[in-house]
Amino acid sequence: MNRREILKAGAALPLSQVAWSALSGHAQAEAAWPTRNITMIVPFPAGGQADLAARPVAAALEKIVGKPVIVDNRAGGAGGSVGNAAAARAEPDGHTLLMTLSSLAVLPEADRLFDRPVAYEVSQFAPVARVLADPTMLAVPASAPWKTVEEFVADAKKRPGEIPYGSSGPYGTLHVAMEMFAASAGIKLLHVPFRGAGPALTGLLSGTVQAVASAPGTLRAQVDDGKMRVLACWGAQRVPSFPDTPTFQELGYKDVEFYIWAGLFAQKALPEPIMTKLRDATRKAVLAPEVKKTFETAGSPVAYMDAPEFAKFVETDSARLIAAVKKIGKVE
């Protein structure tokens, strides 16, 4: 049979048979997931909460699925927007995942606030699992003169706009938390954006900035080494690994509450069979004893939620954060 005859024979196949062959191919691909390396995008540099969450989970996930899981730090700045957008555009085949933070919902609203093109929408993602959920903590250098929030606020009122604080970028998690506190305290601070939480902490250690809001797990070692001091936390309750640190609510700032959660996402169009396998593998990875021990040692215990519960959590938390951003308004 020559080429022309083969083409004619293919064209003569019933449409249903052609469709069945295509569907069968898709089903085989879904059943075989993963068929190659998995990339877990972290939209921040190493050293922050998302990176802290990603690396132990990726290592455990790799053992479970039998393929390399590569952590890809897309530190493009913009509070994580660049990495989030890259994950949103990826092929929805389960080979590109996103480990990101609560700022996922905030950044599109910031784009709209400044009339910028929206880099991505939250609706493009499907929540897979929540991994960590810690209240942020206000940290200052150990050499700083402030021992309490009261002293910090008093100094800031004397020097409006002069005390610099670091963040992971405009409207990222650290920025929103600090502006929430500043608005409630009636103070003006100097915002110094970095390319991620890790560089912001480095800025604090080097003296470039004098305050940061960060997760307990990223602060524990520095506090233990006597390099930093924590003044308060944004949670409704005290953090077990910092039992002597008061909450902002205890100190009278009733509307100051912020959590820096880290969660795994895939694309909304990910086929359900792959999502089911991914959820099961992620649950096993996050709850693996060695992963739980790693997080507990860092001072950020596992806060696992499976996809349905996590989706509801993201919806509720995002609404609260979007309202906070609108209240804060345009800030640089």
Image (cartoon, grey):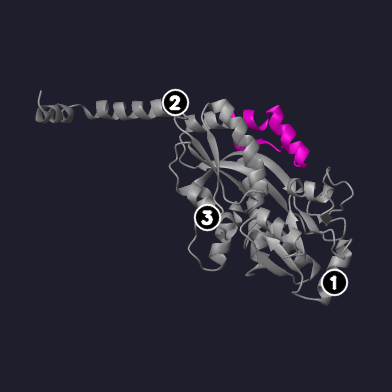
Q: Quadrant of the C terminus?
A: bottom right
Mark 3: few/some/many CA within 10 Å (<14, 14-19, 20+) = some
Residue contact at pointers 3 and 2, CB within 8 angstroms: no
Occupied quadrant, residue 263: top right
In three-dimensional space, the C-alpha distance between marks 3 and 2, rounded to whole angstroms, equals 30 Å
Front in this rendered view, residue 214 or 135: 214
Q: Residue at x 67, y 53 (%)?
A: 198
Amino acid beneath label 2: Ala
Q: Residue at x 40, y 28 (%)?
A: 29
Eyeballing the image, is 316 above or below 57?
A: below
Q: Is residue 127 left or right of residue 156?
A: left
Q: Which residue is mark 2?
A: 32
Q: Is residue 320 left or right of residue 98?
A: right
Mark 2: few/some/many CA within 10 Å (<14, 14-19, 20+) = few
Q: Is residue 225 visible?
A: yes
Amino acid beneath label 3: Val
Question: Nearer the N terminus, badge 1 or badge 3?
Answer: 3
Per the rendering, the mark at residue 82 is 3
- In this picture, which residue range is highlighted in magenta? 280-308
